[in-house]
């Protein structure tokens, strides 16, 4: 049973990142942020949800929207799986809005827990492309800089009753889509391995589960590079998320 708001006992909630959405309809065709994941997960009995948050809102704004959605669920125990900025939203929710202790686990996928220099570069950039990104992604970008995330981490402590797990991702520059290569090179020079937007070091939080071979967008099922078996492109996101859901379902 997927996307039933009256699901009993347990629920898994997928949380999108910056500029994300749940489902959009374009020319009569539906597209999901986590591409094709909702229908794929119908094979499992555990209810799964995909809420829509303000795409470029501040963490607090997005977290309040997520908390309001969770309040609608009748599930007694909730597992959160979050991509990118969504992981920061979830941490805020756990810290401020989990008084009933319903949230059991948080698994973050390439979340910039310690910020990303890319956010600051876009804010400060003078080229037209940076101006375009600012128009789309502000004010969220202000919350994603290393300095902002340092302050966030000082204020938002982990809940000892919640299990925090994290995955990072990376591809070398030569495996990146052409659009992402300048960002990958710049982040590699400043912060080491990265997925074109988030350094591996920044994505580590709680129990670190490993580094996935994927770029940042590829983790949601949207492949902007050429298919290449030797490079394991595209990343098999359906199999990966299905394994996470199975693991959570089995953990009781």
Image (tube, helix red, strand yellow):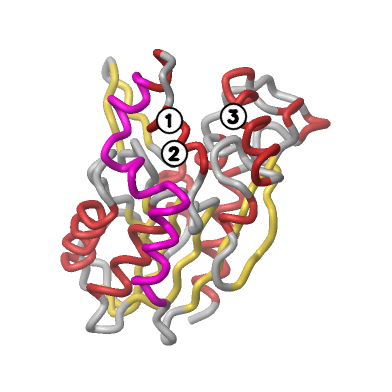
Magenta segment range? 131-157
Q: What residue would you read off at disc 1?
A: 122
The N terminus is located in which quarter?
A: bottom left
Which secondary structure dominates the residues rendered in magenta? Answer: helix
Give the alpha-carbon distance from disc 1 to disc 2, as whole Å: 5 Å
User: Residue 143, which numbered label?
Assistant: none
SS at badge 3: helix
Q: Secondary structure at mark 1?
A: helix
In this view, 133 is above or below 37: above
Left or right for 201, reference 15 = right
The residue that mark 2 highlights is 119
Question: Does label 3 or label 2 sit earlier along the sequence?
Answer: 2
- Rendered residue at 40%/50% (across/down): 85
Mark 1 residue crowding within 10 angstroms, few (<14) / some (14–19) / many (20+): many
Does the magenta run of residues contain 140? yes
Label 1–label 3 contact, CB within 8 A: no
Asked whether residue 47 is in view, the answer is: no
């Amino acid at each position: 049973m997927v996307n039933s708001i009256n699901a009993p006992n347990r629920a898994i909630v997928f949380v999108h990142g910056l500029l994300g959405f749940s489902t959009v309809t374009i020319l009569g065709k539906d597209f999901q942020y986590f591409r094709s994941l909702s229908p794929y997960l119908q094979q499992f009995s555990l209810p799964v949800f995909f809420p829509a948050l303000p795409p470029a809102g501040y963490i607090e704004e997005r977290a309040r929207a997520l908390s309001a959605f969770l309040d609608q669920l009748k599930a007694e125990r909730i597992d959160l799986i979050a991509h990118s900025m969504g992981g920061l939203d979830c941490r805020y929710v756990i810290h401020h809005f989990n008084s009933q202790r319903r949230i059991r686990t948080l698994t973050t996928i390439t979340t910039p827990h310690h910020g990303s220099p890319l956010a600051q570069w876009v804010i400060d950039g003078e080229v037209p492309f940076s101006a375009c990104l600012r128009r789309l992604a502000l004010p969220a970008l202000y919350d994603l800089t290393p300095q902002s995330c340092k302050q966030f981490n000082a204020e938002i402590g982990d809940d000892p009753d919640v299990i925090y797990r994290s995955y990072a991702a990376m591809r070398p520059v030569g495996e990146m889509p052409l659009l992402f290569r300048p960002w990958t090179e710049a982040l590699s020079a400043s912060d080491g391995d990265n997925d074109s937007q988030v350094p591996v070091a920044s994505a580590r939080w709680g129990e670190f589960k490993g580094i996935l071979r994927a770029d940042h967008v590829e983790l949601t099922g949207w492949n902007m590079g050429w298919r290449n078996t030797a490079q394991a492109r595209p990343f098999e996101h359906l199999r990966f998320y299905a394994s996470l859901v199975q693991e959570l379902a089995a953990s009781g």
